[in-house]
Image (cartoon, helix red, strand yellow):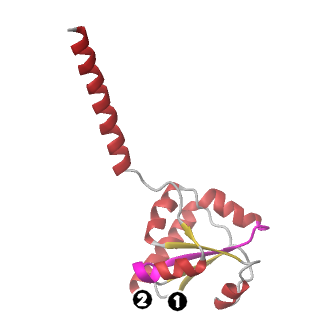
Amino acid sequence: MKRYIRHIILLTALFVVAVGVGVSITTAAPTSIQWYDYNEGMILAKEQNKPSMIDFGADRCGACRKLDEETFTDGRVIALSESFVFIKVNTDKEREIVDKYGKIRFIPTTIFTDSQGHEIHRVIGFKNADKFLKEMHTALSKAEGS
C-alpha cells in the first residue's frame, strides 16, 4: 500500500511539473531583441512585410552603449521589437551602409524604414525606454500609412 501511495505522489508531482513547464514554454515572451546585420535584416523585412529599425552606432560611443544597456533591454521595447526587424550597423566598419542613408552626424542614430527600405522616421541620440517607445509607435504608424 505504501508503495502504491508513493507512486501516486510521484506521478502527481511529475504531472504538476510537466504542466508548469508546458505553460511557461507557451507563454514565454521574448527576453531580448533579435538583431540582424544589414543585408540579412533588409531581406527579412521585405519577406515578412515588416518595417525595420536600423541602429547606427560604434563601439567607442558611450551613448550607443547606454542605448544597448538601458533602452534595448527594457521589456516593453523588447515586446514591441517583434513588430520590426532590428538591424545593427557599426558606423566605423560599415561606411557604405551609412552613406546610403545620407548624413549621419551623430551617433546613435536610429532610422526606421518601411518594408522596402525607404526611410520613414529618424531618431538622433540616446532615448530612454519611454521616449524610444513613442518613437517606435510613430514609426509603426508611418509604416502602416506608407
Which three-letter amino acid code belongs to the residue tagged 2? Ser
- Residue 54 in which image quadrant: bottom right
Label 2 residue SS: loop
Q: Nearer the viewer, residue 87 or 102?
A: 87
- Quarter of the image that includes the N terminus: top left
Q: In the picture provided, is 116 more to the left or to the right than 26?
A: right
- Residue 141 in which image quadrant: bottom left
Task: Identify the residue position indicated by label 1 in the image.
Answer: 118
Is residue 86 magenta-colored? no
Instruction: Report the magenta residues as a range.
Output: 45-61
Q: What is the spatial separation of the Cα atoms under label 1 and label 2, in whole angstroms?
A: 10 Å
Q: In the picture provided, is 114 more to the left or to the right than 2?
A: right
At 53% from the left and 62% from the top, the residue drawn is: 33
Compared to 18, does 73 lie above or below?
below
Task: Identify the residue position indicated by label 2 in the image.
Answer: 146
Q: Residues within 10 Å of mark 1 (few under 14, many from 20)?
A: some
Q: Nearer the viewer, mark 1 or mark 2?
A: 1
- Residue 29 in which image quadrant: bottom left
- Do tag 1 and tag 2 residues touch (Cβ < 8 Å)? yes
Is residue 58 magenta-colored? yes
At 51% from the left and 69% from the top, the residue drawn is: 134
Q: In the picture provided, is 101 more to the left or to the right than 8?
A: right
Q: Nearer the viewer, residue 139 or 34?
A: 34
Percent across and percent down for residue 116 are 47, 88
Label 1 residue SS: loop
Percent across and percent down for residue 122 are 59, 81
Which three-letter amino acid code belongs to the residue tagged 1? His
Mark identifier at residue 42:
none
Percent across and percent down for residue 48 are 40, 78
At 70% from the left and 66% from the top, the residue drawn is: 64
Q: Residues within 10 Å of mark 2 (few under 14, many from 20)?
A: few
Percent across and percent down for residue 128 are 61, 62
